[in-house]
Every structure is written in C-alpha cells, then in structure tokens.
Image: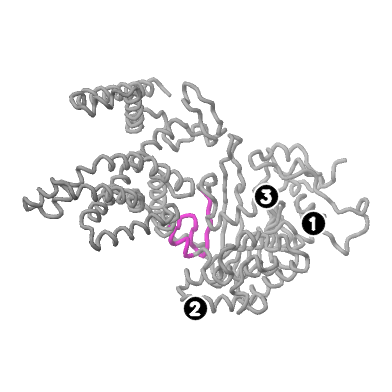
Amino acid sequence: MNLWNWLALGGAAVMALTIVAEIRRHTRTSVAGRRFFRHPTAAPGLFVLAFFVTVALAAPLVAPYRPYQQIDIDRLADHAPSTRFLLGTDPYSRDVWSRLVYGARISLGIGALAMVVAVTIGAAVGAVAGYLRRWVDPALMRLVDIGLAMPRMFAMLVVVALWEHLTVPVFVLLIGLTGWFATSRLVRAEVLSLREREFVSAARALGAGTGRVIFRHVLPNAAAPIIVSAALGIGNVMLLEAGLSFLGVPRAGDLARRDGAERGGGRAAGRARSPQGGGVTEPLLRVRDLQTYFVTEHGSGTARAVDGVSFEVQPGETLGIVGESGCGKTVTSLSILRLIPEPPGHIRPGSFIEFEGRNLLTLKPRELRAIRGNQIAMIFQEPMTSLNPVFTVGDQIAEAAIVHQRLSRRAARTRAIEMLRLVGIPDPEERVDHYPHQMSGGMRQRVMIAMALVCHPKLLIADEPTTALDVTIQAQILELLDRLQAELGMAVMLITHDLGVVAGSADRVVVMYAGQVVEQAPTPALFARPLHPYTEGLLASVPRLDAPPAREHGRLHGIPGQVPAATAWPDGCRFHPRCPYAWDRCRAEAPPLLDAGGGGDPGTHTVRCWLLTDPRRRTPHS
C-alpha cells in the first residue's frame, strides 16, 4: 500500500468516528438512544460496522490494486503480509487486501439490496395474511411453508443453471425472492396481535381502507422485528452469495467481466477464411499454435500444459495422439471443446482452433453449446466417473437427443435403445433402464460411446477409451469404434499412451511430449521409420511377437526418467535429459518442427529433433 491508501484508510476511520458521534448526538434526547449507548459494546460495535461499510464504499481509494490484477505474473510469488501487501498475496499473485475490500463492497451491496427485496415481499405477505385472515391467511401460509421446505441453495443453483446470462440485478432479485418466507411468518405473528388494538379500530372508524390500515398503521408498529430480521438476514445473504460463488456461480465482478468478454468475443467471432485451392479437401479440424496454460497454487509458476500444438484432422480419418501421461494429450482435447476450467486454466491469445471454417475460440456460449455433443462429441477416460450414478443409462443417452434434436422423451428413449443396440449391448430394451453400477466396465464404455454418437457427430474425440479394460474388451472397443466410424463416416481423434493401440486403427499419428508435438506422420511411415528418439522409445516399449530376442535380460525397453513438470520444462529440446543422442545443441537450442521428407508431400512427416540435421550423431552415448 502506498501513502494515499494509508491516508484513505485513516480517513475511513475518522468518518466512522464521526458517524458514531452524530448518531449519539441525535439519539441523546430519546430514552431508547440513551439505553443503547449505555451498553459498553454499543459504540465500539457501531464504529466497527461504520468503518467496514466506509472502507467498502471507498474501495478504489483504499485498495492499492484492482481485484483481478496479477502483480507478479511471471513468478507468481506468494508474498507475505507487509507494508506494501497488507494481507499478503494469494497463489495467483493478487493482493488479498484489495480483493477483500472490493469483495466487501460487492457482498454488502448484494446483501443489502437482496434483503430489501426479501423484507418488502415478506412484510407485505405477512401483513396481508395476518390482517385479512379468512381464506387468505391459510393460502399464503401454505405457500410460505412450501418456500421454507424448499432447499434455498438448490433452488438458486437450478435457476442459475437455466439462466443463460445472469446479470447482477437478476442475481439480487433471485436471492430476495427465495428469502422472504421467514420474514413473512414473523410479520404475520406480529400483525395478528396488532390488528386487535384500539388504534386499528379507530383508523377503520375514520374510514381508512384496508390497504391504508395495513401499511400506515399496522406495519410501522411491527418495524422492530422487521429490522432485527433484516439485520440478521444480510449476514445470511452474504454467506449464501459466498457459497454460490464457491460452487461456480460468478460474483458481480466476475459476471460483468465475463459478460463483457463474451460480448467482445462475439463481435470478433466470424467464420475463419479457408485457404483457396481447387481439388484439395479442407481439414475438418485445424489446430494452430494452441497454448493452454494453468496458473498453479503456492506460487510455483505457470504450467504450460499445451505449448504451441498444431495438427489437422481430415474428414473421415482417424488421427492417433500418443504420449506418456503428462504430455498434454487430454488438455489438448479439452481445449478443443473449451472445457478447460477458468481459472486456473486459460487458452492464450494467438491460439487457433478451426472446425468447419469456424474459429471455436471466438464462438458465443450458445453457439459453442450447439457444437458440443452434436457435431463434436467426446468419450472421457473413466466411464464409471463420467456417468451420472443417479440417472439410468437410457436417460443419459437420450439427453443429447433431447437438447440438440428436440426429440420428445418417448422418441429419445427409442433413440437410446437404438444406440445401445448399435454399440452391441444385448437386450437394449431392458438395459436402457439400468443404472451405471449395474453394468460391467466394458458395457459402461459402450454406453459412453452410445452417448457420444447419439447425434451422429462429425468428429469423435476418444480420450483413452480403453483405459482400465482387459485386453479382450480393449480389442472389442477398438473394433466397435472402427465399425461405427465406417458406418457413420465420422472422423476420430484417438488419444492414448499406447502406440500399439493406434497401430491398427489410426491413419496418422501425432506424438506429443512435454506439451509439444515432437513427431507426426502417416502410421505406416512412423512405424517403419521413427525419427524422434522419444518415438523410438515408445515403439521399443511395445511388446512384439516378431521382435528379435536380443533385448537385454529379456526385458522390454524403458525410457529412462520421467516427463518433467509442466512448470519447469527443460531449456532447449525438452526431451534432452532423457535422450541417448543429446549433445550441446540439444541443451541450448529448442528445435522447431522439421520436414523429414521421405518421398511424400511436404509436411507429411515432421519431427522436432536436431538429429534430422545431423544424422551421424544417431549413436547412443556410452
């Protein structure tokens, strides 16, 4: 914090003292005021409240940084509390004091406005019910009983999930509309005793109408419990707002920032221009220089999970993406559908993902949802955790058809049965009503495939579709994908860590290591002539019946070491710490993707390795 921030903070304290003094002066003549300030904690408590409210209102003057500003974005250092950082910084290098002050302004504003809505509705409903009695009282109280029995957090999450663009006024209104029930009961009980008072009879005798009697004569006398209820309710609303924010409902600042970003992105969105060329088939999917980074906790740096990945998928082909765990394969697939959690992840500017001529990174949320599950579908790694345990498999398969194809529930159920039959599940009419736990691992994986294919997508992303399955079931799943691809004419991105899986399935192979593409080639060329040492190591680790019996001690080859952390990629070639051919240039200079030639079209076989420029060095060091 700088000098002006400290002066503003002192000014807030002076303002709070002034407010307490003025309140004390104005209430000195009343018995209630003198009784209130006679309590030893009254004045200090009022000062603390006034100070916090003043600081929140003066956030731009008291806070030295913007709430979302990352101060040290390069190192993301987690600073301890000091004179510069009053409460330190968080793991993303954002000033905690600034975020607290701005957050207090948002929370106090939402709490106060929401309680105004809740108290207004609750007081009106309670007063009408308590004063009119007859059938009005039972009808309104049954409505209140329903509201009190309804889980408030659940109702809010449902409404927020169905609301496409939630603005701050609507968010405040929703909190108020779900929080007036207790106030209405409190006011009703007070009005039931007040309606029999003489002054009420006098007002009626003067010809005052029902509305005037309720709102001018009865409600002002019920102000004390209403004020207490509102004061306690503001704290509850702030807790509710914090809980919703924790569960993913954006706060006011996040809403404004996200809505602005989406509107800006929508204006920039448009169909990407396809390169002109007669007789050349345009790729179905084109990925260029994709960079997906994650800001890590505890100030350990930025994880560059995907760092400059480029590839293409042609219509109807199968592209295999292989590499060890931690190489960025799954993050690449999630980035295509923009499923990266933000924060901590983000796709960096300059990345380009084009599907059928449209840049997916600039589409509006509604347009992107029309593509997900409809034109691009995805099979996730573990079917048991990817399937919802509280819904039948039929409901989960039918959901995509209902959302994208507007089918009725009956028609969607029929489609689900057809898809179960298509993926080879016996007795689909019976299995459609089963829950995931009632099925084996192989059958659950078939259900995942049925869910992905129910809308006949043009591109299927299969992320480790044979994980945790035995060899027999693996073969069945791969054969099923090949058959369905031939029948439906779709393209497939097959992501796996096993080159043996893609050997008989993929038309082309992309090998990834440390967030980069290190080699890509047609499958026959890659298996016949692997050029990158990492590809050599992966192939050597695959069991083969035709392999010569010269392997040391009869063991399969293993690549020494492990994939480095994404926050600390090595300098130069990222594979050089594990490479048997590495020399000084590999350690000092990062190689680009080089064209390996090989008699095909330019760019057909590319490799990220300096060995291509100096093949004589392809001799392992002793």
Q: For the residues carrying marks 1 and 2, which lies nearer the camera in this image?
A: 2
**Residue at horizontal 69 percent and vertical 72 percent from the top:** 480
Q: Position of residue 284 (x, y in %)?
A: 56, 65
**Residue at horizontal 10 percent and vertical 52 percent from the top:** 204
Q: For the residues carrying marks 2 and 3, which lies nearer the camera in this image?
A: 2
Label 2: few (<14), some (14–19) or many (≥20) C-alpha neighbours in 10 Å: few
Label 3: few (<14), some (14–19) or many (≥20) C-alpha neighbours in 10 Å: many
- Give 535 or 396, whichever is nearer the viewer: 396
What kind of element bears circle 2?
Answer: helix
72 with respect to 487 (left or right): left
Return the disc, 3 or 1, that comes first in the chain's sequence: 3
User: Amino acid type of disc 3?
Assistant: Cys
The residue stretch that appears in magenta: 350-370
Read off the residue under disc 1.
Answer: 539
Q: Which mark is residue 327?
A: 3
- Give 78 or 219, whichever is nearer the viewer: 219
The C terminus, quarter of image = top right
Q: CA distance from mark 2 to mark 3?
A: 44 Å
Q: For the residues carrying marks 3 and 1, which lies nearer the camera in this image?
A: 3
Return the disc, 2 or 3, that comes first in the chain's sequence: 3
**Rendering colour mode:** one colour
Read off the residue under disc 2.
Answer: 410
